Amino acid sequence: MGVLNEFYVAFDNQMAVYYPGQMVRGNVVIDVKESFPVRGIRLEFYGHSYLHWSEGSDKHRRHYSARETYFKSVVLIYGKLPKDGSQEEEFTVGTHTFPFQYQLPPVLACSFEGDIGYVRYSVKAIIDRRWRIDPTSKRAFTIISLLDLNTVQNVLSGPISASFRLPRTGYVPGDAIPLYAEIENLSGRRMCKSYIEIIQRVHYHATTKTRTIKRQVAMVARPEIRPGGSDQWNGEVITVPPVPPSFLHGCNIIDIDYLVQLNVDPAGPALDLEVALPIIIGSIPHQTVFQQQQFTSRPPAAPVQQPSQDTSHPTRDDLYGPSLSGAPLAPSLPPTSIPNLPPPTYSESVFGKTSFLDSEDHRETQGDTTFAPRYTYYTWN
């Protein structure tokens, strides 16, 4: 990194998970090994969504895209902005720590990473040096938008079909969904297996076209069914993994819904039998369900780190681990009217990490190059 030993952004909230309207606090740490002139140091907070895909080939290829910006703000933490003049100051050898805070807007879409689109939030620290490439360090953070199942009608009623049923339609990540199905194989062909999966359907709305992509988020299976035989699903469970809530409220170009689908897979070349039931996945459980579950297993509250008495400069481990300010390592409880709701944990998306660099980042950008959003996850089951 040339004249720098370290340059990074750290959040007081170690998990970097926030709800709309909350305050983002943290520190920028710069360890200088050789002094150099600096005009200023600024933070760029950026929240946006983007999608793109192409169809056809060569001369007939068409591109489809859309984007939204939720916020794009600059916070000066040292010196001056480029527009305020060209005078530089010498940045001395040693470790420099700059605290910051940023108020999030009250309405934001939930963080999301898809195959051809995303909703992303980040903060980028930039050391402004005239006539040189600006050293840059980038950190991603998760926004969880609220979908309170107590505000959604009919989430306790169960969609029922002749062969496949669920006890209700509304769930949160961590819920174990009991499965009930009856299958009769009246054909002369062996059924290799039956399986039930949770499917995430993502609808990407470009300016002139919409594309839908399905992704499997969980699956359980039962053995083969012989010709003339039958099989039953009698309360086996499938657990909702960490995923964003249905609808992706606040985003106008990406929409999400979920299905629980029963599949019967026949041997040889034949079409699967499929029976799909829609469900709603929220971020706050329905109060009735919570009251049924609350005495089984209550997760511990998020630990709080006590303020340190050490007045020396913080290390990278200090900042990426326990909070300097004594703030919780995890975010506070989701805003809800449910009394005594146990705090959820915050788990990485079931789809894992993806590249977080975009076209505006140069190859020397430090910080998060990959990222997985975190979502609420309830463990009382």
Image (cartoon, grey):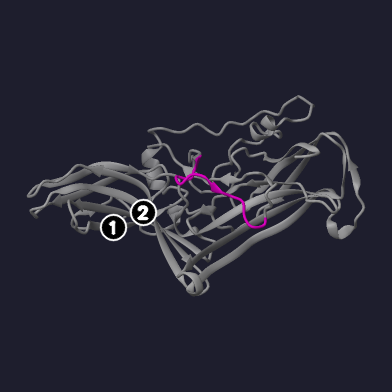
* Position of residue 74 measured from the top left corner of the image (x, y, whole percent): 75, 55
Q: Main secondary structure of the magenta part?
A: loop
Give the class, few, some or many, for how many residues have Cα within 10 Å of label 1's Cα (few <14, many ≥20): some
Rendered image quadrant of residue 96: top right
- Quarter occupied by the N terminus: top right
Tag 1, which secondary structure?
A: strand
Residue depicted at x 64% and y 32%: 321
Tag 2, which secondary structure?
A: strand
Residue at the disc numbered 1 = 276
Pointer 1 or 2: first along the chain: 2
In the figure, is residue 189 to the left or right of 141?
Answer: left
* Position of residue 298 measured from the top left corner of the image (x, y, whole percent): 44, 33
In the figure, is residue 354 to the left or right of 305?
Answer: left
**Are dots 1 and 2 in contact, CB under 8 Å?**
yes
Direction front: furthest residue: 58
Q: How many marks?
A: 2
Rendered image quadrant of residue 224: top left
Residue at the disc numbered 2 = 199
C-alpha distance separating marks 1 and 2 = 9 Å
Q: Which residues are magenta?
A: 346-360
Please tell me which residue lies in front, 214 or 275.
Answer: 214
Residue depicted at x 66% and y 36%: 327
Which residue type carries mark 2? Ile
Give the class, few, some or many, for how many residues have Cα within 10 Å of label 2's Cα (few <14, many ≥20): many
Report if residue 160 is visible in the image.
no
Residue 262, magenta (yes or no)? no
